[in-house]
Amino acid sequence: MINHACVLIEAGPVRLLTDPWLSGSAFNHGWELLAPTPVSIADLSFNYLWYSHEHPDHFAPAELLKIPVHARDGVTVLYQATVDGKVAEFCRSHGFKVLELEDDRRYELTDGIVVRCGQHRGSDSWLLIETPGGTILNLNDCYLPSVADAQALHARTGPIDVLLTQYSFANWIGNEGDDAYSRALANMYLRILANNLQVLAPRFTIPFASFTRFSSRENSHLNRFTNRVDQAVETIAANGSCPIALYVLDRWQLGDTSHDNTSAIAAWAAAARQPTSVCSEPPSVAQSDLDLAFERYVTRIAQKNDMAAIRTLSAAGCLPATRIHLTDLGRVAVLDICAGALAWDTDTQDFDIAMRSDSLSFLLRHEWGRGALQINGRFHANYATLRRFICQTQIAFMNNIGRSYPATIAETEVVNPSTFILRVVDRLHPVDA
């Protein structure tokens, strides 16, 4: 175990590193590692590097570029084949060999060591690693909320010996003060873990990819609900798998049933008790800079989509403008992708979502910005009207994974988007039938 979702798997001549995020913050000043990593990626010896998906706690470009230039031709990056090819091209441009993994296709890295990657829910992926010593499934963040979802995956992977899986939530789960529901959602992740274990039936399970804390004044309340490693260990043991808890730089040999989880549980508990090193608030972004960022945001949308079709959707009342209260500016930005510019208002009581201006700027400058916001939780939602914000930003969000409206984005995906935070909101604020 290196840290968080980063593990180093050694099998014969293959030394496979996964999802290295070893330092710094992620998701626009929203997350930090629960415990520091005492080594750099440049200190590690590996010849394969797998990235599960583009989220910055998995694909961290700054970490990748710490690998010395002279060592890069000795590393092959493994990544799911995607429509846009962004991650693969980025890695190639910096001197790495890249093997793009077709969905469900077996790739033999060397004699007896085979990997198979499966795409999941549009952007994530899992990796099955077959070795002479056993089969390992790295599930990372792949979300399998139902028994049927787990059964469908099991039908693809077959029996597995080791499961590496997330055990806590990794996103906004409600406004500050909605404690009962936030706790219920955190518990839901342990129930999902239990269901997955009963279906996938791994001999051993390593809980990982949840070793983070929320690190902003806007989201630090969410740390109270994070599931603990000891809870994950108890859930794993209660569902017929041998739990293997590992702390930073701990090692484990596949098949070793004598592993003692005590020290790792204690070490993670001690790390969780450390005060959150709340990131200093990023500087405010001027209204004029937000205006310019919005113009460029709309230009990108126009380049990648059929704006006439989007305007037709808007004219039908399916894309109402969204009101964004910028708490540090004391103003409301009214965002409508069919308008030529942001509108501004001083009525800060009427909003769909509240955030700092740097968060809106990040969203407008990066197509993945909406995704980062959902995960970092640096916002306060108006449960009754948040859907307007999600709909207005949905097309750019889907452009990030190479899709275009209406060619490859269905109308229902824009006007009735399926996102976790809307499912949270629907439970907190049910809409009358």
Image (tube, rainbow, N blue to C red):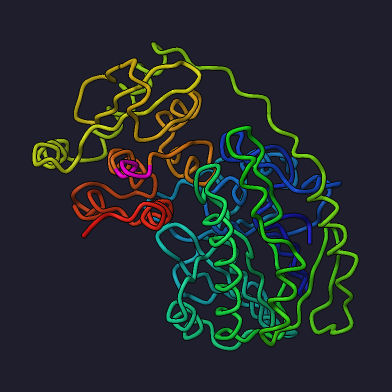
Residue 163: where, in percent of width, then height?
Answer: 66, 76
Expressed as whole percent of the image width and height from the top left, the position of residue 8 reads 75, 63
Q: Is residue 398 above or below residue 165?
A: above
Residue at image coords 55%, 62%: 184
The reply, left or right, for residue 214 in relation to residue 176 is: right
Residue 145 spot, x, y in % from top left: 47, 71
User: Is 394 placed above or below 5 here?
Assistant: above
Quarter occupied by residue 201: bottom right
Residue nearest the viewer, comparing 62 with 258? 258
Left or right of 130 on screen, residue 353: left
Report if residue 113 is visible in the image. Answer: yes
Please state the extent of the stretch shown in magenta in the rendering: 383-387
- In reply to whether residue 385 is colored magenta, the answer given is yes
- Quadrant of the drawing holding the N terminus: bottom right
Q: Residue at x 35, y 49 (%)?
A: 402
Q: Residue at x 49, y 71 (%)?
A: 144
Q: Which quadrant would residue 46 be assigned to in this image? A: bottom right
| Helix, strand or loop: magenta stretch | loop
Q: Position of residue 433 (x, y in %)?
A: 21, 60
The relative height of residue 313 versus residue 131 in the rendered view (above or below) is above
The residue sitting at 20% across, 39% down in the picture is 319
